[in-house]
Image (cartoon, grey):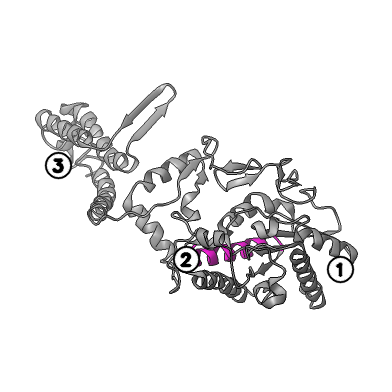
Amino acid sequence: MIRGKPLPAEANRIRSWRRAGAIPVVLDLLVVITLLTIPVIWLMDPLRLGVGRFNASASWGLKPVLFLFLVLLVRRVTVRGSAGLLPRTPVKLLLLVIYPAWIFLLLAEGVLALAGYSRPLPPIVIRGESELRSPVKYPAFAGDAELGWVLIPGASFQGRTINQLGFLDREVSERKARATRRVICMGDSCTAQGNPPYSGYLHELLTEKPVTPETWEAFNVGVHGYSSWQGLKLYRRRVRSMQGDLVTLFFGWNDHWSTQIADSIRYPRFFSPFVGKVLNALQRKRFYSLMVHALRGRPRTGKRERIRVRVPPEEYVRNLRKLVDEIRGDGAIPILITAPRTERLTGRIIRANKPRNMKELLALHDDYADLTRRVAREKKVELLDLATLLVGPEGSRLFMRDGVHFRQEGLERIAAEIHARLLSMAERGAL
């Protein structure tokens, strides 16, 4: 540009563009749109577009590529010189940024396909659009897409009525009363069982001998069959709003139950419509699955972990860590509890876990108790080590015949141990 006038070469390009008219711009616009759309079609295959009553879809295959070549051919025949959008530097830079990355992903997907790579991820569900329900065996339970199953308020289960919050305990208010300290007991059937459960005995002890001058109460949100993975989801969805001051965590049996599909894969995750559609598209790509599993890290398995379990050891540790962190983040105090056992378990328990022998199953369960202790050490959290306290002939008398669940006197003992720990925490100033 010289004193406001274009240079000769620039002037020639402008004149050439004017002579060519709008044709090269329109054709190049089609080329650019097609070039940008091809990777999106591959990623979102099939790509569905909807605006009002207009709905269209495009599937990955030869059609998008053939359309690109057709437009380029028409451009070649009809356009002379360098007029249009394609010769311009901004368009070239845009395509240079997008295409190398896409070609790399395309090649990676092909290599993973040839290698036979396939690792599932949990299904993605768009909130408000899914009626997905999991099958349940008992009439007192309803299927739930996120948690697998939940208890039905007002229904009867094993001679007990499920309260309006959906748990096997007395009726309690979701909102805590003023000047009240609340203990919430989380866990599986070991927490939910009994009439009353151990939370009921604990409530009586706290009423008769409160830990501090305030009013104290306790109740459980345990659900039969729940693992720590479901416990974490339940805490986020329901328990957090109950304003617990202390939350006990009693998991460890269902986590090492034998299964073909781990809990983290079996149950879906819920997202908004836009995020859900994008993640659903990514889930169909092998490279995305590889990246997700790589970021999660390869679980370190013990030498005894031959059985496929609902919650593998490192996932169990992660779940407990997250529960501890989130409970603390909500201003409450977590208390970890190890799941005790007897020296012998019933045949039904053994068949459900598919071990080689009784010794292997007991060793596997002990590993999960050790993992609970590990999290307590790492997070410097209170640990009630029932697996150490309830041992020997005296401890065995507290169990039912299956060697997992407790007689009523066993539930009373658990409540007494929790109450004693709370008194000790109060003396140490830990409350």
| Image position, residue 9 (x, y; %) | 14, 42
Above or below, 416 relative to 230? below
Residue 207 horizontal side relative to residue 35, left or right: right
Which disc number belongs to residue 9? Answer: 3
Q: Earlier in the sequence, mark 2 or mark 3?
A: 3
Tag 2: Cα neighbours inside 10 Å, few (<14), some, or many (≥20)? some
| Image position, residue 127 (x, y; %) | 54, 39
The residue that label 2 is drawn on is 355
Could you tell me what secondary structure mostly forms the magenta stretch? Answer: helix
| Image position, residue 77 (x, y; %) | 9, 29
Closer to viewer: mark 2 or mark 3:
2
Above or below, 16 relative to 297? above
Q: Is residue 318 magenta?
A: yes
Mark 1 lies on a secondary structure that is: loop
Image quarter where the N terminus lies is top left
Bounds of the magenta segment: 312-332
The residue that label 1 is drawn on is 212
Residue 334 horizontal side relative to residue 131, left or right: right
Give the Cα separation between the discs numbered 1 and 2: 46 Å
Give the Cα separation between the discs numbered 3 and 1: 88 Å
